[in-house]
Amino acid sequence: MALIMDGNGRWAKQRGKERIFGHENGVEAVRDTVKAAVEIGVSYLTFFAFSTENWCRPDNEVNTLMQLLVDAIRNETPELNKNGVRLQAIGNLESLPHSCKKELMDAISLTSQNNKLIVNVALSYSARWEIANAARKIAEKVKNQEISPGDIDQDLFSNYLETGNIPDPDLLIRTSGELRISNFLLWQIAYSELYFTPVLWPDFRRKHFYQAILDYQKRERRFGKTTEQLP
């Protein structure tokens, strides 16, 4: 499963607060969603936490977001271990502030033996960046004669993406009522089911998570086939 956590700013504005107030309260939504995912046996959960485009936001918001991320990772690592959750990250991690990257790498190391749920956090990430980066890596391999152009197919290309070690999501959830993908996992969601909810992210709880899954369970996934061809 994958989640676009949207609506923190609007949630804060509705309460007469600064946007960062929404981001701070969104941490509880992450915590409850992760616990719910563990309880019902979800294998992979990818959160869109910070896009490459988000660097264009006001400096004070970006700086506060990075500090919030550091604090959240540090505070949540014991809970992740308690629940058997392994942390991973995708994106241009080299662009993160040193303190943020260090906390992230420490948490990834400390949770590396857990196997109930893999939580994948997309940071400084965009799908177009990811696809271009994969193409660049493959081009280097061709240039060095490590692979030939004839070797390039969908499976090989997928292995060079940031998510090369995890399966494509069955379900993508976006909160806040916005009906767009916002440059997230464009390759991976080719056949994912999409679920949009008007709930703003700080208000998102396990009951909303379950509603999305129940809606997903009613759908028929044909992958280009007809209904009659399905088992």
Image (cartoon, rainbow, N blue to C red):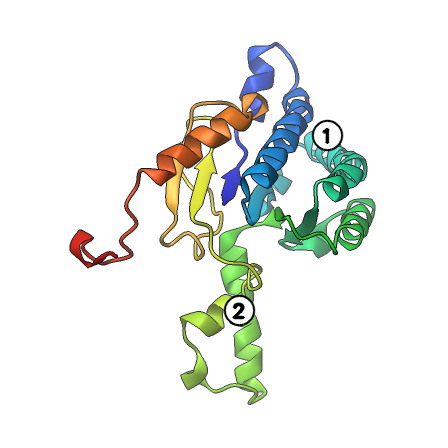
Q: Residue at x 74, y 56 (%)?
A: 113
Q: Position of residue 194 (x, y in %)?
A: 38, 41
Q: Which residue is mark 2?
A: 159
Q: Which residue is mark 1?
A: 60
Q: Residue at x 73, y 49 (%)?
A: 96
Q: Is residue 128 above or below residue 71?
A: below
Q: Is residue 61 left or right of residue 1?
A: right
Look at discs 1 and 2 and give the one toward the viewer: 2
Q: Residue at x 83, y 45 (%)?
A: 99
**Which SS class for mark 1?**
helix
Q: Residues within 10 Å of mark 2 (few under 14, many from 20)?
A: few
Q: Quadrant of residue 213?
A: top left
Q: Work out which quarter of the rendered image holds the C terminus and state it.
A: bottom left
Question: Sequence-wise, which precedes: disc 1 or disc 2?
Answer: 1
Q: Residue at x 53, y 77 (%)?
A: 139
Q: Position of residue 28 (x, y in %)?
A: 66, 26
Marks 1/2: CA–CA distance:
37 Å
Callout 2 amino acid: Asn
